[in-house]
Image: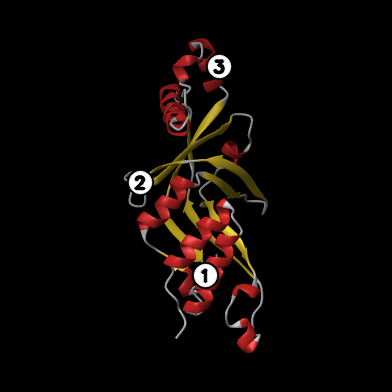
Amino acid sequence: MTYLPPHFAETDPATLHALVCAHPLATWVVPQTDGELLVNHIPFLLDADRGPHGTLVGHVARANPVWRALGTTASVAVFQGPDAYVSPSWYPSKPVHGKVVPTWNYAVVHAHGTARVFDDQAQLLALVTRLTALHEAPMAQPWQVADAPAAYIDTMLGAIIGIEIPVQRWVGKWKVSQNRSEDDRQGVAAGLQARGTVQGDAMAELVRRAVSSKI
């Protein structure tokens, strides 16, 4: 269960999917019957139109015990978007009443679903081909699976197991200063942007687009 005040909840599927696609490396948590948790970091593809809520697809090493431990309990894949420290000195309200403290802004998506495995070589080849094409696209000379010897690729495919997670529910949490006044939010955005970092710029944009929840 996630602590999620209503004013931080994000439910728009397109917004959630966009974060997953922009930040595909998920922290995948699988609960075990003995109470232990298996935690892995997996880059997933999202097939948004497969199933009622979409399906996540990825792979793990065959040597990874997680795929043998999957049961009928839902797991969760956590996708982390922009995040940034927020200084109370950025709030215009600070010199007025001083009732301000530091906080941390972030945007995250949790995908809940029961995972299943596949090891059909054709499916695995299709998956790694898609992953490669997606992530090599920005390269000046994109590498392709066919660039490697076929026998070598067959060996590599034998060393992995495919993972599919039909998503049963999405949880989005956008903590982007909605609980501050308009002036304070603009101060946060300006402070973040002044840091000159990629994360700061990304969070500043989310803060500027946020709608204040204050009455």
Task: Tell me how far mark 1 sits from mark 3, CA to CA.
Answer: 45 Å
Going by the numbered disc 1, the residue's amino acid type is: Leu
Left or right for 12, reference 187: left
The earlier-in-sequence mark between 1 and 3 is 1
Please report the residue visible at 55 percent of the width from the left and 27 percent of the height from the top. Answer: 160
The residue lying toward the viewer, choosing from 92 and 127, is 92
The answer to whether residue 20 shows anywhere in this view is yes
Going by the numbered disc 2, the residue's amino acid type is: Ala
Going by the numbered disc 3, the residue's amino acid type is: Thr
Query: Which residue is disc 2 drawn over?
Result: 48
Q: Position of residue 181 (x, y in %)?
A: 50, 80
Query: Which residue is disc 3 drawn over?
Result: 155
Q: Position of residue 206 (x, y in %)?
A: 47, 62
Query: Which residue is disc 1 drawn over?
Result: 4
Left or right for 98, reference 128: right
The residue lying toward the viewer, choosing from 146 and 117, is 146
